């Protein structure tokens, strides 16, 4: 099995005091996935210092990871759906 090394880094930038960005690097290991060795890699940009931006980024990360854990159809469609549903959860949480 070929090994690859993946690294990620976020930066607070020049205007903010806290870093609200987060990363996903998750193997898609379910035996139901059609291809072996697939990895979900994503950068979730914080929301620019708004109150709760770190919470929004965490909700997005957790929901996308959970949604993508098991195949539910075409992988690109799933990724779109995961992002839309994560956004809906963030809106609900903000209320």
Image (tube, rainbow, N blue to C red):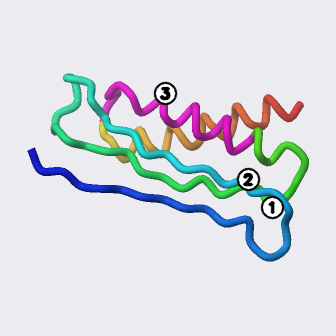
Residue occupying the point 26% across, 24% down: 30
Mark 2, residue position: 20
Camera-near label (2 vs 1) is 2
Q: Is residue 82 left or right of residue 5?
A: right
Q: Is residue 2 left or right of residue 48?
A: left
Q: Which residues are magenta?
A: 56-73
Residue 35: x %, y % from top left? 16, 39
Q: Of helix, strand and loop, which mostly describes the magenta segment?
A: helix
Residue 79 against residue 5 in the figure, above or below: above
Pointer 3 or 2: first along the chain: 2
Residue 92: x %, y % from top left? 79, 29
Q: Is residue 69 magenta?
A: yes
Residue occupying the point 32% across, 38% down: 27
Residue 58: x %, y % from top left? 67, 38
Mark 3, residue position: 66
> Which label sits on residue 48?
1
Camera-near label (3 vs 2) is 2
Mark 1 is surrounded, within 10 Å at the Cα level, by few (under 14), some (14 to 19) or many (20 or more) other residues, namely: some
What SS does tag 2 mark?
Answer: loop
What SS does tag 3 mark?
Answer: helix
Q: Is residue 91 magenta?
A: no
What SS does tag 1 mark?
Answer: loop
In depth, the one of 71 and 20 nearer the eye is 20
């Amino acid at each position: 099995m070929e090994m690859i090394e993946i690294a990620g880094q976020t930066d607070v930038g020049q205007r903010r005091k806290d870093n609200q960005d987060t990363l996903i690097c998750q193997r898609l290991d379910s035996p139901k996935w059609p291809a072996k060795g697939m990895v979900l890699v994503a950068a979730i940009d914080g929301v620019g210092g708004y109150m709760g931006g770190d919470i929004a980024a965490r909700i997005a990360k957790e929901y996308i990871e959970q949604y993508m854990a098991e195949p539910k159809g075409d992988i690109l469609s799933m990724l779109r759906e995961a992002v839309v549903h994560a956004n809906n959860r963030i809106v609900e949480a903000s209320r």
